[in-house]
């Protein structure tokens, strides 16, 4: 019988506001586990012992014959992904009101999920050179059945039936697996999860299929500029260096290994045998049971993990990582101009209490006056700048820390890269001259401590994964605090790290469409990226090493006036009954403004979220007005940046965006200085007049954004669907054409009319009293003394009402001529929302999704290996309900993909008929758990309320109502819903298929469609003869 060799309940430093209990244990096999008792999971106390054992144990003998052979949605590999590159800035309608119907976060019954995560201290740095991507492949294979649970989809099917989900990712030095589930099924999930690390099957036939999944995942990012850049950096690193590898893995890297005589199964088993032992494993379990019960479960289930020493794999490398004095130019896929500078220095893991790299990132990445960012923007050379050591991958490893400065350039900035680098070194010289400043460190320390003390909760599985990673990174006591703490001021260490910021230790990459002028380029072997390697002249290197002067426009930031000092909780001094004020109430309803308010009683943190949508007169009346409005909002956002940046550093954030004729303004974070910031923002907005220089640069950036729209096939398919569904939809290419002709005088003459009448709807939620909220509303009224915009002048969106039996198709080629991925998105229009009946309809749609999501993935992804993305989800488009099936594939064309989706849909009758009562109830209960799950934080709750406001639904208890409706839904109701809306024999089955054809397919095949399908060639012409639903929002 396994047992603990170490146990402590008081070792973990936690926030005084954290009610969870933590226990660290170590097992005889070397495995470390952090047990977390969350009292909010079972507010009334955990269920009786027999009940939760029955839930978690008895069902383990069930046979899930209707859904076998599939894995979880694992493999969300984060290597090489870079979020800054990933936002396509699609047309605003796509971001605004069309999205998944939210199945979760109802909040009323205060239920929470249980979760667990296992972090294993081995990643892609441990790949054998002859089988690159093996660690990532191993991550995939652990989902494919075990000795105790041989069915490939047993783990994911169990989670799916019990309101859960799972994921996993492979990093350079660790691999993390995590899940969440209804709390009463935690032990059953832990049992299945434990077998990943005890006895995975790794069947050869499963391996052959899963190689295709690895390849599909790689093809997802094949055209991603950030991933391509990182692989160029790996490819050009020193031979034999840990960076010099291809960590993604694909069919070529793995199949080539087999063709070269490598026994892939032997290699993967060896990797597992060598590294998947207790000494390299960190487990986190979050449950509502007592720490003693959680400990018993972990000892019982994970005691059989192979024994191993508690070590941390470390990778050493001698000499420089990259050649000195080189400039690399990478040909971009998207229309971008990026200057990427990197400096390397020794691993600083051991100095996490001092965080010298964060001190330097704060200054080098600052955006206020005196900063590099501000100076380069003023010169018209840059639009954004970020700096620091990344959290993952090769940027923060035992080999080295890599400090990156990424500067997005204007076209003129692209011509000035050597001058820009010179100014970077002027600022670095400034930092050396003024010496490290303790007051700056103390500001970061105050912000870190404040953020730790009042940290908002995350979803449970995210928190479990974060803690598991931190167990590998920090001493146990700082597993939570380690990310926030600035404990020791060490000026000498900062000077030491600053010493690595030299031209000799710098790598320069330029990513641009026009990077490569000649045919004399090299080709990176895995992504096929074109790049050149140039010498930087010694005279430039000398100039950068010691700039002769420092421009007077460069100086350190001023003290931060937005760091809060008042952390009092407003609800502590009130005697109101929180049960009577669960939802926002309207405190102002006037022609100019409607304002909703709710004081927070749940989270009791000194935070508030204030959201506003401002209708602008004629802002979406026609194509030109739409483009001018968007340009105005982008210029306003640009002008606000200097004001809001310091507040952002102090965790008080601002966001400005456009939704049709509305400017959306959000100010959120610590509430102490929120009114002051809102006043400054609105005053700036009122007096804002665009200047010639900023107009030129922001217009250029907007053109670039429009050119990059629809570069990703999945975004493109959603765009094409909305272009058909929405009556008013301005095409990105048309917007670009109009934008090219616009001058600053056009904008200056447009703004007064645009702002001559307004209508504001807002929400104040959090730690502000009602009188404080009214003061905020008065700031608007005093700032904008304009007449109200009447309702008939506000833009209303209408959604097409597809005719009975509609069977429509829209075909398009991929925008990027090198993009191999094709997409089929099959949209079924259901009904427009209408009163209480729509709540029941939403319950049916969500329950159907809950039932079919895993079988769809299992059949089309795991068995048929159509592509990495296989998904279905409810959709709501301006309050018209729908349902979507979507597959992205680099192997098959859209016609074949649609055939497989149709075949799956046709087979659902059999699947639904064969669903036994117990399984059906499990799915219902799983959905119920999602609907009534407690909002993890104030921000989640605010967003839930805000979605009701912007939809003009105002049904703040929607999830609670849906849960009530769910109780009366039977299997026959779901089957009838399926027959009515998804079976083609029904007149209420209205389909719109979007086909995006990859570069390796033949779009001419679309011409041979059956006569029963109507092709939409020109959406505008099609919509002229169509009927539309009345607008509800």
Image (cartoon, rainbow, N blue to C red):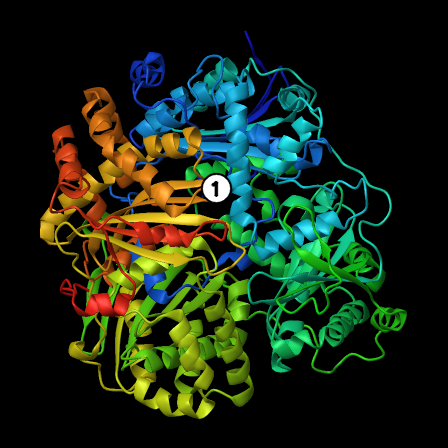
Q: Is residue 82 above or below residue 863?
A: below
Above or below residue 1033? Residue 1004 is: above
Residue 353 placement (x, y as % from top left): 68, 47
What element does badge 1 sit on?
loop
Place residue 909 in its image quadrant.
top left
> From the viewer's perspective, is 377 left or right of 16?
right
Out of 35 and 176, give the one closest to the viewer: 176
- Tell which of 1004 and 752 is nearer to you: 1004
Is residue 361 positioned above or below 914 on the image?
A: below
Residue 417 is situated, as x and y percent measured from the top left of the image, at 72, 73
83 vs 441, left or right, is left
Q: Residue furthest top?
A: 1
Q: Looking at the image, which residue is at 41% across and 88% down?
A: 747
Looking at the image, which residue is at 27% across and 65% down? 770
* Numbered disc total: 1
Q: Which quadrant: the N terminus? A: top right
Regarding residue 202, the answer to whether it shows in the image is no
- Name the one closer to the observer, 40 or 727: 727
Image quadrant in which you'd find residue 165: top left
Res 947 quadrant in image: bottom left
Mark yes or no: residue 102 visible. yes
Could you say which is closer to the camera, residue 748 or residue 897? 897
Q: Quadrant of the C terminus?
A: bottom left
Residue named by callout 1: 891
Q: Residue at x 65, y 54 (%)?
A: 529
Where does residue 381 sit, x and y in percent of width and height?
64, 77
Q: Is residue 745 left or right of residue 496?
A: left
The relative height of residue 721 versus residue 467 in the rendered view (above or below) is below
Mark 1 crowd level (few <14, some 14–19, many ≥20, 10 Å Cα): some
| Place of residue 427 in the rendered image (x, y in percent of width and height, measured from the top left) | 74, 72
């Amino acid at each position: 019988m396994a047992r603990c060799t170490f146990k402590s309940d008081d070792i973990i430093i936690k926030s005084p506001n954290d009610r969870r209990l933590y226990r660290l244990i170590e097992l005889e096999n070397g495995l470390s586990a952090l047990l977390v008792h969350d009292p909010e999971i079972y507010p009334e106390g955990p269920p009786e012992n027999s009940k939760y054992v029955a839930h978690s144990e008895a069902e383990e003998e069930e046979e899930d014959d209707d859904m076998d052979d599939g894995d979880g949605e694992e493999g969300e590999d984060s290597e090489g992904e870079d979020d800054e590159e990933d936002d396509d800035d699609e047309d605003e309608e796509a971001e605004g009101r069309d999205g998944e119907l939210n199945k979760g976060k109802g909040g009323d019954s205060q239920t929470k999920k249980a979760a667990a995560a296992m972090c294993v201290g081995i990643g892609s740095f441990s790949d054998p050179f002859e089988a690159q991507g093996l660690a990532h492949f191993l991550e995939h294979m652990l989902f494919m059945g075990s000795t105790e649970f041989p069915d490939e989809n047993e783990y994911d099917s169990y989670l799916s039936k019990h309101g859960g989900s799972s994921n996993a990712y492979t990093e350079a030095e660790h691999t993390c697996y995590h899940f969440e589930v209804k709390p009463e099924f935690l032990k059953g999930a832990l049992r299945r999860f434990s077998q990943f690390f005890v006895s995975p099957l790794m069947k050869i036939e499963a391996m052959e299929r899963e190689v295709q999944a690895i390849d599909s995942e790689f093809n997802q990012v094949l055209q991603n500029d950030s991933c391509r850049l990182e692989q160029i950096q790996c490819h050009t690193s020193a031979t034999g260096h840990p960076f010099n590898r291809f960590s993604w893995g694909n069919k070529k890297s793995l199949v080539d290994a087999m063709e070269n005589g490598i026994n892939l199964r032997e290699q993967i088993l060896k990797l597992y045998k060598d590294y998947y032992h207790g000494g390299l494993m960190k487990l986190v379990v979050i449950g509502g049971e007592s720490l003693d019960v959680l400990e018993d479960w972990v000892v019982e289930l994970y005691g059989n993990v192979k024994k191993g020493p508690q070590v941390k794999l470390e990778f050493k490398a001698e000499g420089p990582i990259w050649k000195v004095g080189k400039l690399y130019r990478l040909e971009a896929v998207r229309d971008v101009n990026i200057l990427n500078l990197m400096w390397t220095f020794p691993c600083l893991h051991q100095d996490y209490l001092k965080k010298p790299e964060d001190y330097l990132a704060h200054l080098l990445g600052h955006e206020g006056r005196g900063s590099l960012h501000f100076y380069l923007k003023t010169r018209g050379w840059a639009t954004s700048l970020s700096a620091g050591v990344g959290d993952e991958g090769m940027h923060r490893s035992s080999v080295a820390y890599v400090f990156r400065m990424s500067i997005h350039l204007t076209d003129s900035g692209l011509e000035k890269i050597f001058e820009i680098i010179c100014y970077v070194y002027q600022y670095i010289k400034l930092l050396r001259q003024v010496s490290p400043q303790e007051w700056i460190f103390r500001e970061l320390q105050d912000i870190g401590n404040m953020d730790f003390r009042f940290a908002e909760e995350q979803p449970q599985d995210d928190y479990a994964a974060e803690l598991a990673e931190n167990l590998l990174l920090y001493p146990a006591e700082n597993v939570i605090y380690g990310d926030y703490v600035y404990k020791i001021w060490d000026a000498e260490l900062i000077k030491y790290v600053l010493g690595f910021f030299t031209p000799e230790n710098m790598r320069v990459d330029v990513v641009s469409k026009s990077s490569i002028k000649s045919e004399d380029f090299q080709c990176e072997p895995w992504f096929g990226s074109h790049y050149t390697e140039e010498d930087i002249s010694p005279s430039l290197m000398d100039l950068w090493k010691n700039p002769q002067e420092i421009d007077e426009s460069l100086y350190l930031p001023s003290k931060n006036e937005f760091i809060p000092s008042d952390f009092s909780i407003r609800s502590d001094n009130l005697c109101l009954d929180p049960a009577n004020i669960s939802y926002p109430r309207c405190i102002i309803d006037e022609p100019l403004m409607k304002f909703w308010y709710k004081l927070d009683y749940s989270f009791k943190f000194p935070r508030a979220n204030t959201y506003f949508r401002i209708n602008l007169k004629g802002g979406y009346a026609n194509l030109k007005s739409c483009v001018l409005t968007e340009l105005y909002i982008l210029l306003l956002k640009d002008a606000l940046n200097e004001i809001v940046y310091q507040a952002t550093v102090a965790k008080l954030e601002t966001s400005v965006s456009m939704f049709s004729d509305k400017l959306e303004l959000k100010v959120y974070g610590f509430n102490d200085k929120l009114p002051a910031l809102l006043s400054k923002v609105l005053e700036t907005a009122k007096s804002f007049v665009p200047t010639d220089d900023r107009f030129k640069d922001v217009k250029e950036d907007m053109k670039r954004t429009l050119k990059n729209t629809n570069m990703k096939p999945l975004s493109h398919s959603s765009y094409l669907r909305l272009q058909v569904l929405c009556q008013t939809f301005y095409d990105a290419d048309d917007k670009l054409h109009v934008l090219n002709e616009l001058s600053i005088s056009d904008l200056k003459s447009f703004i007064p009319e645009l702002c001559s009448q307004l209508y504001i709807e807002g929400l104040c939620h959090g730690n502000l009293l009602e009188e404080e909220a009214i003061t905020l509303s008065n700031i608007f009224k005093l700032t904008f003394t304009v007449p109200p915009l009447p309702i008939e002048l506000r833009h209303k969106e209408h959604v097409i009402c597809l005719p009975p039996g509609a069977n429509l198709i829209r075909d398009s080629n991929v925008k990027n001529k090198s993009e191999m991925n094709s997409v089929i998105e099959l949209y079924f229009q259901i009904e427009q929302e209408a009163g209480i009946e729509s709540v029941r309809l939403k319950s049916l749609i969500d329950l159907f999704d809950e039932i079919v999501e895993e079988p769809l993935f299992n059949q089309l992804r795991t068995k048929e290996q159509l592509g990495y993305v296989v998904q279905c989800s409810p959709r709501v488009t301006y309050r018209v309900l729908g349902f979507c099936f979507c597959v992205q594939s680099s192997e098959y064309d859209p016609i074949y993909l649609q055939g497989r989706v149709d075949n799956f849909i046709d087979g659902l009758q059999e699947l639904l008929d064969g669903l036994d009562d117990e399984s059906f109830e499990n799915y219902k209960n799983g959905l119920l758990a999602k609907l009534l799950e407690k909002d993890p934080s104030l921000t989640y709750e605010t967003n839930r309320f805000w979605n009701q406001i912007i939809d003009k639904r105002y049904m703040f208890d929607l999830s609670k109502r849906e849960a009530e409706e769910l109780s009366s839904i039977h299997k026959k109701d779901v089957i009838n819903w399926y027959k009515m809306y998804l079976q083609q024999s029904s007149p209420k089955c209205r389909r719109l298929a979007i086909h995006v054809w990859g570069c390796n397919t033949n779009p001419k095949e679309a011409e041979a469609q059956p006569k029963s399908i109507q092709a939409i060639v020109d959406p505008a012409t099609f919509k002229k003869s169509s009927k539309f639903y009345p607008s509800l929002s």
